[in-house]
Image (cartoon, grey):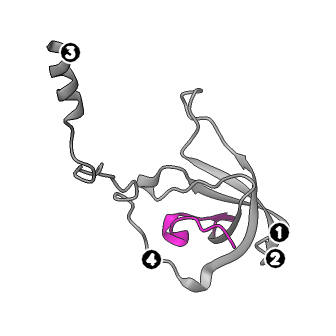
Amino acid sequence: MIAEILLIIALQGTPPGDFRPTRTIDPYALCICKAVDEASVVRFTGYASDAELTLSDDPLKANDRQATIFRVVRGLSEDVAEVTKVYHRANPAKCGLSFDYGKRYDVAAVKKEGVLETDWCLMGKPRKAE
């Protein structure tokens, strides 16, 4: 009798399609974009091939600011070499990005203090080139 009651309870569930979806939080909700002069934006297409990470004061953690190294296939210029390093933050709350190694991206960056920098505001969600 107890087994039958437990079976009935187990079979009684929420009807299919009658569930509450998991709420997702936008990781970029705290990102605040600053205005950028479109004329200063450098654009190129390249493959993410490597990264440059530095350690924070805690040697078990990487700094939020890092660089991704791209092998450029289109858009070479005086600011963009065949192998180009682009600095960015990794934390989405600070408008950071991440790139997957081996994937091709259309990159938008600006030159600041002699290096290229990008963020979510310039690129939006990183777009893999078609």
Q: Which mark is residue 35?
A: 4
Q: Marks 2/4: CA distance?
A: 25 Å
In this orientation, which residue lies closer to the viewer: 21 or 128? 21
Part of the protein shown in magenta: 111-130
Pointer 2 residue = 76
Q: Which mark is residue 81?
A: 1
Q: CA distance from mark 3 to mark 1?
A: 72 Å
Disc 3 versus disc 2: nearer the observer: 3
Q: Which mark is residue 3?
A: 3
Residue type highlighted by circle 1: Ala
Residue type highlighted by circle 3: Ala
Write the residue at 19% across / 35% down.
12
Mark earlier in primary sequence (2, 4): 4
Point out the image quarter for the C terminus: bottom right
C-alpha gap between disc 1 and disc 4: 26 Å
Residue at image position (24%, 49%) is: 19
Quarter of the image with the N terminus in it? top left
Provide the secondary structure element on which disc 1 rests.
loop
Q: How far is the residue under mark 2 from the one under mark 1?
A: 6 Å
Q: Is residue 79 above or below residue 70?
A: below
